[in-house]
Image (cartoon, rainbow, N blue to C red):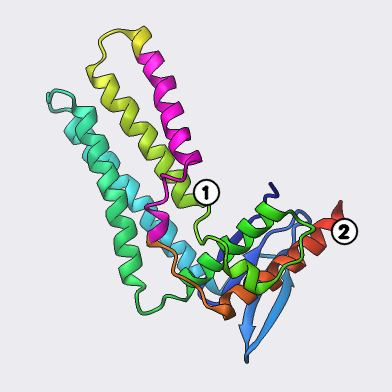
């Protein structure tokens, strides 16, 4: 498996080779343009800042809510808190998708990014990248951040729910290991993708072509570093 790093935006896809450069692939006047930059997509920094502030507020509100609820003497309060947090995260993703329903290009580029990453993962970095073949790949990536988040939520839910009902410390430790195993097993079997499906849309030839050209440049730079 060949691991590459990339990120999708409304205007294109960024790839991050090991040399510190940033490759940005986009479509301009009907043609694919691949640029090499020294920093991430500048035009989006304001949006990224707003998103980070939103996440910060999200977790701050949760800390306050959990602190208040935690002081209440409610049996198995951990189970309630975990369930509350899980549904909050799902709702957050759902709102984020619907907020952008009139501007879905980033979701298409996100899917195109996953397709080309999956292609290289499967066939290797020396494989010939063909747009038509890449389009046949899955738009779901097991390494996507939303899937990793889902794995963490599943693990936390299993462990805390079990911990609330297990009286002995040694059994709690055993259950911790079992919870981790179950979460990783579900991840390996592709059962943790439901949040990811909220932030990808089936791409067209144009988006996949951008992803392919960006990946070609990424691989070229990586091979020159090796």
Which residue is at 44% across, 57% downward?
52
Considering the whole magenta stretch, tell me its main secondary structure: helix
Check residue 16 in the rendering and tell me which mark sits there, or answer none.
none
Labels 2 and 1: the sequence-earlier one: 1
Residue 190 in the magenta stretch? The answer is yes
Note whether residue 40 is visible: no
Compared with 149, 110 (above or below) is below
Horizontal side of 3 relative to 150 (left or right) equals right
Which residue is at 49% across, 57% downward?
140
Please, what secondary structure does the residue beneath circle 2 have?
helix
Horizontal side of 161 relative to 133 (left or right) equals left
Note whether residue 64 is visible: yes
Which residue is at 68% across, 46% downward?
1
Give residue 166's quadrant in the image: top left
Give 141 or 13, whichever is nearer the viewer: 141
Residue picked out by circle 1 = 142
Where's residue 59, x and y in %?
34, 46
Where's residue 62, x and y in %?
28, 43
Check residue 224 in the rendering and tell me which mark sits there, or answer none.
2
Where's residue 117, x and y in %?
63, 58
Give residue 84's quadrant in the image: top left
Q: What stretch is highlighted in magenta?
A: 172-197
């Amino acid at each position: 498996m060949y691991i590459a790093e990339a990120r999708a935006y409304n205007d294109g896809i960024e790839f991050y080779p090991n040399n510190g450069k940033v490759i940005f692939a986009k479509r301009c006047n009907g043609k694919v343009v691949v640029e090499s930059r020294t920093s991430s997509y500048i035009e989006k920094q304001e949006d990224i800042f707003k998103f980070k502030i939103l996440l910060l507020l999200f977790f701050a509100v949760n800390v306050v809510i959990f602190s208040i609820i935690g002081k209440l003497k409610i049996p198995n309060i951990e189970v309630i808190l975990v369930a509350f947090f899980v549904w909050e995260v799902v709702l957050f993703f759902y709102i984020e998708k619907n907020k952008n329903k009139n501007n879905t290009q980033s979701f298409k580029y996100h899917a195109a990014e996953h397709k080309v990453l999956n292609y290289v993962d499967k066939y290797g970095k020396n494989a010939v990248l063909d747009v038509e073949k890449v389009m046949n790949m899955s738009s779901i990536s097991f390494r996507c951040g939303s899937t990793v988040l889902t794995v963490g939520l599943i693990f936390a839910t299993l462990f805390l729910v079990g911990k609330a009902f297990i009286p002995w410390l040694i059994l709690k430790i055993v259950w911790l290991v079992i919870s981790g195993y179950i979460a990783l097993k579900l991840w390996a079997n592709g059962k943790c993708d439901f949040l990811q499906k909220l932030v990808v849309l089936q791409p067209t030839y144009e988006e996949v072509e951008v992803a392919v050209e960006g990946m070609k440049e990424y691989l070229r730079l990586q091979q020159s570093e090796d």
